[in-house]
């Protein structure tokens, strides 16, 4: 993925992103929370997981002041320090999915 790729254009042009995003918006209309709210629901979590797994290069860095980012950084660092590869991979995946929510959410949204 090139450095000048616009994350929004990928989320709009990737067929799986489009399908998952439509599902998330339908769930939001039905009352499920979304990243612009406080707690993302399962449909938004599926979209975040897809973005983290298929579009990793688009993810923003850790967000300063985000308690969840800080907690996940701690988990990644702890797993690295203890040499637990499975735990490290799980923490890294959780961190990528959380950072994907930052990508999908409004800049000032709380995506805990």
Image (spheres, helix red, strand yellow):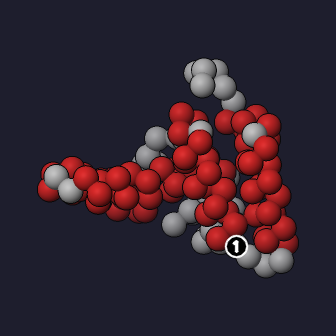
Please indicate whether residue 44 sits to the left or right of residue 70 in the image: right
Image coordinates of residue 34 in percent, x first then y, are 70, 66
| 55 vs 109, nearest the viewer | 55
Q: Which residue lies furthest to the bottom in this view?
A: 31
The residue under the point 85% across, 72% down is 29
Q: In which quarter of the image is the N terminus?
A: top right
Q: Which residue lies furthest to the front in this view?
A: 86
Q: In which quarter of the image is residue 68?
A: bottom left
The residue under the point 44% across, 46% down is 62
The residue under the point 29% across, 60% down is 87
Image coordinates of residue 31 in percent, x first then y, are 79, 79
Q: Which residue lies furthest to the left in this view?
A: 82
Please indicate whether residue 26 sits to the left or right of residue 102 in the image: right
Please indicate whether residue 90 sits to the left or right of residue 41 in the image: left
Image coordinates of residue 86 in percent, x first then y, are 29, 57
- Label total for image: 1
Vertical relation: 58 (above or below) 72: above
Image coordinates of residue 6 in percent, x first then y, are 69, 30
Residue wearing tag 1 = 33
> Secondary structure beneath disc 1?
loop
Local packing at callout 1 (Cα closer than 10 Å; few below 14, some 14-19, many 20+) is: some
The residue under the point 66% across, 26% down is 5
Work out whether residue 16 can be spotted.
Answer: yes
Work out whether residue 102 can be spotted.
Answer: no
């Amino acid at each position: 993925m090139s450095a000048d790729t616009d994350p929004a254009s990928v989320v709009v042009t990737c067929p799986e992103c489009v399908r998952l995003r439509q599902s998330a918006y339908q769930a939001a209309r039905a009352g499920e929370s979304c990243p612009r709210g406080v707690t993302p629901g399962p449909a938004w979590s599926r979209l975040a997981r897809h973005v983290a797994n298929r579009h990793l290069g688009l993810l923003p860095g850790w967000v300063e002041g985000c308690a969840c980012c800080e907690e996940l950084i701690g988990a990644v660092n702890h797993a690295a320090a203890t040499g637990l590869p499975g735990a490290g991979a799980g923490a890294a995946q959780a961190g990528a999915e959380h950072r994907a929510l930052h990508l999908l959410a409004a800049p000032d949204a709380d995506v805990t």
